[in-house]
Image: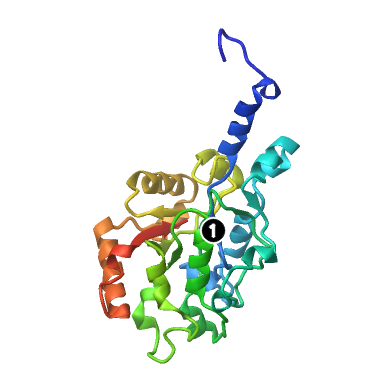
Amino acid sequence: MAGGSFHFFPRLPTELRLEIWRLCLPWRVHELDYPTDEGLSNLEPDSDGSYPCKVIPTAKLNGLPPVITRVCQESRNVANESGSVPRAGFYADLPDDDRFTSFSSVGADDYWLDTKRDTAHINWTPLYQYTYDEQSEGSALGCVAWLSRQVVGHPSIMREWFQWYWFNSDRRYSQNERFEVFDERPSWSVVMHVVIIHANFRDAAQSGLFGLLGDATVQIVSVSDEDKITAFYDFVHEYDPQTSAAGEFERGPMETLRGKLKFDLVKTMGSDKLVHHVSPLHKD
């Protein structure tokens, strides 16, 4: 705007319009599998055994094509520059030993993937085997490490990978796991706590915390990012006070969380080798 005049968007220079569309694209957490209600809600089940929070719909919403793919051809072309729903051929170079599948796995053609903006995350942990007595195939760690090389950011996993007290010695880990994978990536992120926020789409979008257009419904936040954690905390306090009242939104000191993770790492792995290669996070 100059001299009180307003230029209609279609009349802006092409390069400016394209850059605006790119700014609208979400930076997402690309999940390799659906999270389970039992493991993430932190709530007691109802009398019929069901859980009041259903996290799978949120995961599916997070994997839909970005909003701008449904605006016009120009915006859709911008989204397709680095994003698509990957087909089976995308995984052609994935080693056979790392072709991970479980009852919670997402199909190769289910979720949108933006190679320039997404980070790779897996919710599955060895606790799934203990809880559901399920048999997975391939290495979950190997799969998320491979995908992290196709996108940006560090691979992220759940804290339960290092909570040794959940498992008996003969059931702690799948025989398919390759823990040397930790050495293949310079750093890993570990989700220490999951917060489920109840808010309508309009409020979430207007907050700016879930992408510019509200189409990044799953967020992972570093425990050292105090400003962003505060922003989420304020959002929860205003729009979902029940969550904060239930104690789901913990705001523990960063060093306390680092200390917990270090203890679990050393106890599980038998050394402090990984301490400097992992970073604790929140998942909202």
Task: Kindly tell me whether residue 24 is visible in this rendering.
Answer: yes
State the residue lying farthest toward the front: 93
Give the residue furthest to the right: 73
Type of amino acid under label 1: Gln
Picture layout, residue 4 above or below residue 153: above
- 74 lies above or below 234: above
Residue at image mark 1: 150
Mark 1, secondary structure of its residue? helix
In the displayed structure, does residue 74 sit left or right of residue 31? right
Q: Nearer the viewer, residue 106 or 251?
A: 106
Q: Quadrant of the N terminus?
A: top right
Horizontal and vertical percent for residue 67?
Answer: 66, 44
Instruction: Examine the rendering and report whether any part of residue 44 can be seen.
Output: no
Residue furthest top in the image: 3
Taking the spot 62% from the left edge, 66% from the top edge, the residue there is 91
Residue 261 locus on image (x, y percent): 31, 68
| Percent of width and height locating residue 231 | 41, 44
Residue at image location 52% in from the left, 46% down from the top:
210
Q: Residue furthest bottom?
A: 170
On the image, which quarter does residue 281 sit in?
A: bottom left
